[in-house]
Amino acid sequence: MKHTDPRPIHVAIVEDDPDFSNALRLVVQQSADMQLVGRAATQAEGLALLSGPPADVLLVDLGLPDGSGIAVIRAAAQQWPSCSIMVSTNFGDETHVMRSIEAGAAGYLLKDSSPSRMSDEIRSLANGGSPISPIIARQVLARFRHTATAPPASSHAGEDSAALLSQREKEVLDYITKGFTVHEIAGLMQLSHFTVRTFVRRIYSKLKVSSKAEAIFEARTQGLLS
């Protein structure tokens, strides 16, 4: 039986370009399965948004008038651990890409992407995907190929992390890496989605990560998958 999400995807936007911000707003408001829960145009307003109830998806511009959106991403990863973060920006260089991902972003789109595509990308992100533009994907892969040639870290780290995770947490982590959404995992494990989100937060904390992409990367790197 097909599962239907009981509530819309809650979306928050931190974007200083009024035209692009309005385009994103329209995309969200015209999608029956989404709800706009907050909009900000500066870093300060973006950080203030985080004191409210967590959104499911947070769209963040990096070039804000009073500072970098990376500070908002980093704070959101801590304060809204169950939220998926997507960067929307004009910057295409590797430094911004890697800093965003390291701060907690799970998706990255350049602003020349058509706004009409955004609804699909928001859904993908909310369901555990990592939408990313091809040019950015190439840069990320190039960085990972470079780090793969570095000397391996001590195997004790993986053993410690594996020991820290409970059997239930390992089961949730396994489902996450296979691409299942929180609601799908809840159905498979016969748990409430709130309980699954709690497991996800614990996994992030124990692996010292702040996004699905990082959790999957760490799980594979440390050999935590069954």
Image (cartoon, grey):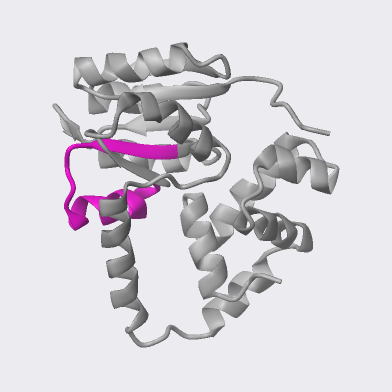
| Residue 69, x across and y down, in percent | 25, 36
Q: Who's the residue at 51% across and 66% down the image?
A: 218
Q: Is residue 101 magenta-colored?
A: yes
Q: Who's the residue at 71% across and 35% down the image?
A: 194
**Magenta span covers which residues?**
85-105
Please identify the quadrant where the C terminus is shown: bottom right
| Residue 46, x across and y down, in percent | 32, 25
Of 94 and 82, nearer the camera is 94
Q: Is residue 205 magenta-colored?
A: no
Q: Who's the residue at 35% across and 40% down the image?
A: 73
Compared with 154, 176 (above or below) is above
Residue lying furthest left in this view? 65
Quadrant assignment, res 138: bottom left
| Residue 134, x across and y down, in percent | 31, 52
Position of 131 with respect to 92 (left or right) is right
Quadrant assignment, res 183: top right
Q: Is residue 145 visible?
A: yes
| Residue 162, x across and y down, in percent | 65, 72
Q: Who's the residue at 74% across and 59% down the image?
A: 171
Of 220 and 121, nearer the camera is 121
Compared with 143, 103 (above or below) is above
Position of 75 with respect to 32 (left or right) is left
Please identify the quadrant where the N terminus is shown: top right
Q: Is residue 40 visible?
A: no
Of 220 and 29, nearer the camera is 29
Of 182 and 118, nearer the camera is 118
Compared with 213, 41 (above or below) is above
Position of 117 with respect to 129 (left or right) is left
